[in-house]
């Protein structure tokens, strides 16, 4: 079958092998000349980028190692202080450890972000990329993310300042407003508390507006003793001082008491009772135990001294009061007089006389 003339290759369309080889030779020659002319610039650019990355990585590693050594030194200092006689009162090793770890994590993250971010911008600048639009876009994106995640940013910043200012730590008993209890864990975003009944509270740091730390400084143990108004105040003061001296000499109360037990005086005077105020400065968190022990010992000492406490059993008097003779006499009754209207109203009706007319229906 003969082919159409349109499908037959023309002689002019057939490629010339000599021309193809010439074009290929010219392309290779141009590429080689281009590489020969620009290889020095490329090598310089590559070495510059490599140098930036190496310096950034080395500087980041150096900073992170320095921060880690600083944290380990802080932890060793805390452990050394804890091994001393009053170390438990001055520092909490777990609290110091978590605080130092949190600070170290923040510092390492900030250092890595700054170093690597600066190195990335330097690499882009070396490549000839215009950083103006990029920085503007990053600024707009940062503002948008800040508005969208403002609660997260607030929690994070609040956690950072709480840790840096050492407002509370692990083992402290705090009142955070929304919840109260013992601090179990301090994070950059959430603080974990254990309540009095054993429940775990997860409180966002941004929601904490005020903090009452019950474990820093010292605490006050206050005891109110109600006695009869007839008791001698001088005798009461002597008995309480004797109890306080005995309490301060015994263990473990000698460590829990940070000051003498003082009788502050009369707090309230009523017709049936008077209240004597007793106070003492104690170790933080131990005021309730000291109050219970003081009440126990004061009650026993008052019983031995014969001092009556309001609310207990009434004190036995030496002489019994004479009985009231009128208590056994009943009140006079109107029915005792037969001529009284009450007696006449209750008297039976007499039968009719003989021969008297009878009323029948």
Image (spheres, rainbow, N blue to C red):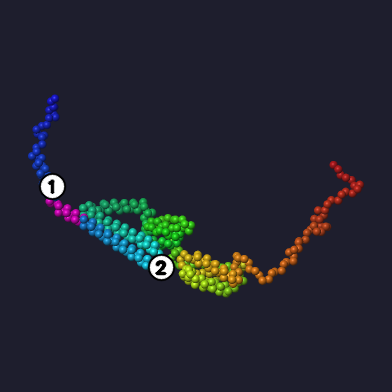
Q: Could you tell me which residue is drawn at 37 percent across and 61 percent down?
A: 98
Q: Eyeballing the image, is 96 above or below 235? A: above
Residue placed under numbered mark 2 in the picture: 87
Closer mark to the observer between disc 1 and disc 2: 2
Is the N terminus in the top left, top right, bottom left or bottom right quadrant? top left
Callout 2: SS: helix
Give the residue furthest to the right.
Answer: 355
Quick one: label 2, few (<14), some, or many (20+) residues within 10 Å?
some
Residue 39 x/y as whole percent: 14, 52
Quick one: label 1, few (<14), some, or many (20+) residues within 10 Å?
few
Q: Can residue 311 be seen at all in this image of the molecule?
A: yes
Q: Could you tell me which residue is drawn at 55 percent across and 69 percent down?
A: 298
Q: Nearer the viewer, residue 323 or 233?
A: 323
Give the residue furthest to the top.
Answer: 1
User: On the picture, is 61 further left or further right than 267?
Assistant: left
Of labels 1 and 2, earlier in sequence is: 1
User: On the picture, is 354 further left or further right than 290?
Assistant: right
Is the C terminus in the top left, top right, bottom left or bottom right quadrant? top right
Residue placed under numbered mark 1 in the picture: 31
Residue 119 x/y as whole percent: 25, 56
Specify the segment rendered in magenta: 36-49
């Amino acid at each position: 079958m003969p082919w159409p003339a349109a499908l037959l290759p023309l002689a002019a369309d057939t490629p010339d092998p000599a021309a193809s080889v010439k074009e290929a030779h010219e392309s290779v020659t141009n590429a080689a000349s281009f590489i020969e002319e620009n290889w020095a610039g490329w090598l310089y650019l590559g070495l510059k980028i490599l140098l930036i990355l190496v310096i950034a990585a080395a500087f980041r590693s150096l900073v992170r190692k320095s921060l880690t050594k600083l944290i380990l030194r802080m932890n060793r200092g805390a452990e050394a202080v804890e091994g001393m006689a009053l170390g438990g009162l001055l520092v909490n090793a777990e609290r110091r450890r978590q605080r130092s770890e949190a600070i170290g994590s923040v510092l390492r993250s900030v250092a890595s972000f700054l170093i690597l971010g600066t190195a990335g911008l330097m690499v882009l600048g070396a490549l000839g990329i215009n950083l103006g639009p990029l920085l503007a876009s990053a600024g707009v994106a940062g503002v948008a993310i800040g508005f969208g995640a403002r609660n997260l940013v607030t929690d994070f910043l609040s956690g950072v300042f709480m840790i840096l200012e050492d407002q509370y730590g692990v083992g402290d008993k705090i009142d955070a407003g929304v919840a109260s209890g013992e601090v179990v864990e301090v994070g950059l975003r959430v603080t974990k508390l254990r309540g009095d009944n054993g429940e775990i509270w997860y409180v966002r740091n941004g929601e904490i507006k005020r903090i009452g730390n019950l474990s820093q400084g010292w605490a006050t143990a206050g005891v109110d003793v109600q006695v009869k108004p007839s008791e001698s105040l001088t005798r009461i003061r002597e008995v309480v001082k004797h109890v306080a001296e005995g309490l301060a000499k015994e263990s473990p109360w000698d460590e829990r008491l940070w000051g003498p037990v003082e009788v502050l005086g009369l707090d309230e005077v009523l017709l049936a009772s008077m209240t004597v105020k007793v106070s003492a400065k104690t170790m933080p968190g131990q005021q309730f135990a000291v109050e219970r022990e003081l009440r126990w010992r004061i009650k026993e000492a008052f019983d031995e001294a014969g001092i009556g406490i309001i609310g207990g059993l009434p004190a036995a008097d030496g002489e019994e009061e004479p009985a009231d003779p009128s208590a056994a006499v009943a009140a006079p009754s109107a029915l005792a007089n037969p001529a009284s209207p009450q007696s006449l109203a209750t008297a039976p009706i007499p039968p009719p006389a003989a021969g008297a007319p009878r009323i029948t229906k």
